[in-house]
Amino acid sequence: MNTVRNQSPLPEDLRVFLTVIRKASFASAADELGLSPAYVSKRVQILEATVGTRLLHRTTRRVALTEAGERAQRWAVQILDTLDEFMGELSQARLAPRGLLHICSSFGFGRNHVAPAVSELAATYPDLEIRLDVFDRVVDIISEGFDLEIRVGDDIPGQHLSRKLVSNQRVLCATPEYLARRGTPQTLEDLSEHDCLVLKERNNAFGVWNLRKAGQEQSVRVSGPLSSNNGEIVLQWALSGRGILLRSMWDVKPLLEQGALVQVLHEYSQSANVWAVYPTRLSDSAKLRVCVQFLEAHFRHLSQQGTA
């Protein structure tokens, strides 16, 4: 595919591209934008020519992102958000955040970390009415009417927009008493000889831990006499010396510092980054924009202070 020389993508082409991704159809995107399908297809072709690579796989029924398209999607959102913020600053046309903001998160993280942040957000923006719901299941934020999901883990649905709030990881740990009784695992395979406290959370595979070492992912099947669908219960069991736990550093860092838990197999970890996931671009909603920006600053501050 030939590249259009000395030309950057037009913001409008990026908007059309993101709409096609969200609607998974040129025709549906055209309906939403009030344009013809042929014109929408042409704008995407021009964008592909400009960047010099194919961004979408086209079939008779739907469209899907190529690998380059996935990268282009992330950049398009960032570019358009930055452009809109730039224009908003210059024009001083940003509206004051007000009205109902419906947020959801997982039970443990929502209760322990999102709830305190939302309390501070409400104090900062008194015209906001905030509802926070917590679940231990997969949530469809569009069909269930949520403005925002605070999600732990990098499995972000492709049809949604997202922004990483803070980097985080899960680590393996157990009490000193358990390790004195059962020994400390030296390899990933050693976990098969240990009581592992298995958590069934959302749509994650039950009894399988996917871990990374030096950038390479490895999977290990684990088992033990205790399992639950609630992370706080599993953490209580770990503190009672009942086995090895895979848990977010957000939750275990104070316990590691106190010596209540000991990290094992330090070279292995699992990504547990914290993301804001939303169906509407931030520039389209003042209440959503200030909320995401506030949470990003809040979690970054906690991380820098060493309390996260």
Image (cartoon, rainbow, N blue to C red):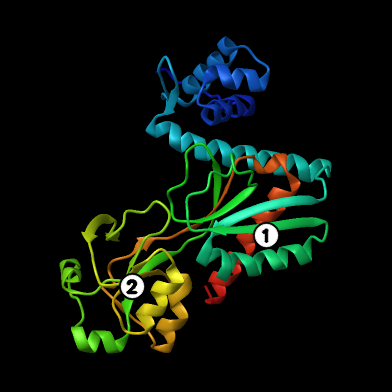
Q: Tell which of 70 and 2 is nearer to you.
A: 70
Image location of residue 253, percent across then percent down: 44, 77
Amino acid under label 1?
A: Phe
Q: Does residue 212 appear anywhere in the picture?
A: yes
- Measuring 83% from the left and 42% from the top, which residue is drawn there? 93
Q: Tell which of 99 and 75 is nearer to you.
A: 99
User: Marks 2/1: CA distance?
Assistant: 31 Å
Image-based side of 146 in relation to 47, left or right = right
Binning the other alpha carbons within 10 Å of mark 2 as few (below 14), some (14 to 19) or many (20 upward) gives many
Image-based side of 88 in relation to 36, left or right = right
- Measuring 23% from the left and 56% from the top, which residue is drawn there? 218
- Measuring 47% from the left and 22% from the top, which residue is drawn there? 48
Q: Tag 2's secondary structure?
A: strand
Image location of residue 100, percent across then percent down: 75, 51
Q: Tell which of 274 and 148 is nearer to you.
A: 148
Q: Tell which of 143 and 76 is nearer to you.
A: 143
- Measuring 36% from the left and 83% from the top, which residue is drawn there? 261
Question: Please, is residue 106 above or below residue 239 in the view?
Answer: above
Question: Please, is residue 141 above or below residue 29 in the view?
Answer: below
Binning the other alpha carbons within 10 Å of mark 1 as few (below 14), some (14 to 19) or many (20 upward) gives some
Q: Nearer the viewer, mark 2 or mark 1?
A: 2
Amino acid under label 2?
A: Leu
Name which quarter of the figure residue 189 lies in.
bottom left
Residue on which the image places disc 2: 245
Image location of residue 202, percent across then percent down: 43, 54
Image-based side of 291 in relation to 98, left or right = left
Residue on which the image places disc 1: 294
Question: Where, quadrant-wise, is the N terminus in this rendering?
Answer: top left
| 2 or 1: tag closer to the N-terminus | 2
Name which quarter of the figure residue 120 lies in.
bottom right
